[in-house]
Each structure stands twice: as C-alpha cells, then as structure tokens.
Amino acid sequence: MKMKTMIHSVLLVLASLICVIVVGCAAPQVNVVRSQAPLERPIHTIALMPSGGVLADAIGLELLRFGFNVIDTGKISGLMIRDNLNEIEITQPQNLSRLNNDGIDAVILVKSVAGYDGRPQSASVKIVHTKTGQLVAGANWQNGRGGAQGSPADQGARVDLAVAAEQIANALGKSLQSTP
C-alpha cells in the first residue's frame, strides 16, 4: 500500500511539473505576414534604416544567408545626408524612389523594445518596396517567458539579440524568397 501511495505521489508531482512547464512557459514567437500583391521583380537589395539599431544590423547580417544584398545603415545615412532627408522623410513614396534609383529594392524598418534583462522583449519589422512604397512583408517577434520575471525558468525561456535576429531573418527570408 505504501508503494502505491508513493507512486501516486510521484506521478502527481510529475503531472504538476508538466502543467507548470506547459502553462507557465512560452518560447519566443515570430509571426510573418506577406503581401499577396505581386511585385514586378524579386527583391535582391535591402537597405537597413539607421533607427533600427543593433537588432536591425543583426537581422541584416542574417539576411545575407538568403542571398540578399544588404545595404548598411552607414550608406543609408550618407544618402539621407546627400538628399537632406531625415528617416521619416526618406520613407515617403517620392523619396523611396530615389533609393530605388540607387539600386535599392526595399528598406527594412525595425522597432524593438528591450526587456528587463537587456535582451530584446519584442520587435516589429517592416519591409517596404522602394519602387511602389508597398509594404511587402512584416514580422512581429516576442521573446519567450516562463514563470515569474527573472526566475530561472524565465531566464531559460528568453533568448538574446543574436537568436532573435536569426529567428526574425529566417521567417522574413523564407517569406521573401517565395515572393514572385
């Protein structure tokens, strides 16, 4: 009888732990949406907007794996200075066409929020076609969480900037490769 009670107790503890893990933890998630509107030609060259910070730079590096030509924030800053434009102005349709004339097919706009631990908490990414001003694709990314903020489970569920960039770039890269 004692053996049955002990086995029952162990199973109860294991079931409780599984419930806590399944309900209390969430892995990082990325959701991508791509426009269904056809493009005249595929996207080959993508420029990183300067306000995207280190996450945009990391995403740009990861997009190289998909064969995209990635234009660094420094070059875009130089073009903005040349044309006397700020980042809001350069994303206006008439100014995007200037980038298109410079051989840039799309710009990537990244906004991110840092978490309590310095790791990214969330990010929003948009890819805008420079010829049409059309939003070609976008991604929303959310870091993982587990248990109470700062707990070992939470720390284990959260990823750093490099992993976040890889997850976002993989999702966007696959989406853009299937663009006709």
Image: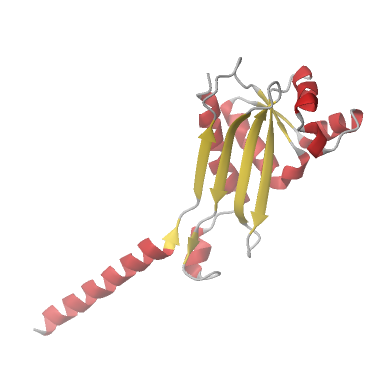
The answer to whether residue 153 is above or below residue 40 is below
The answer to whether residue 49 is above or below residue 103 is below
The answer to whether residue 28 is above or below residue 179 is below
Name the residue at the bottom extreme.
2
Q: How many marks?
A: 0
Quarter of the picture containing the N terminus is bottom left
59 with respect to 170 (left or right):
right
Residue in the image at 80% along x and 38% along y: 87
Measuring from the top left, give residue 145's x and y in whole percent.
Answer: 50, 61
70 with respect to 42 (left or right):
right
Measuring from the top left, give residue 85's x and y in whole percent.
Answer: 87, 34
Which image quadrant is residue 137 in?
top right
Residue in the image at 22% along x and 72% along y: 11
Measuring from the top left, give residue 175's x and y in whole percent.
Answer: 52, 30
Measuring from the top left, give residue 86's x and y in whole percent.
Answer: 85, 38
Name the residue at the top extreme.
40
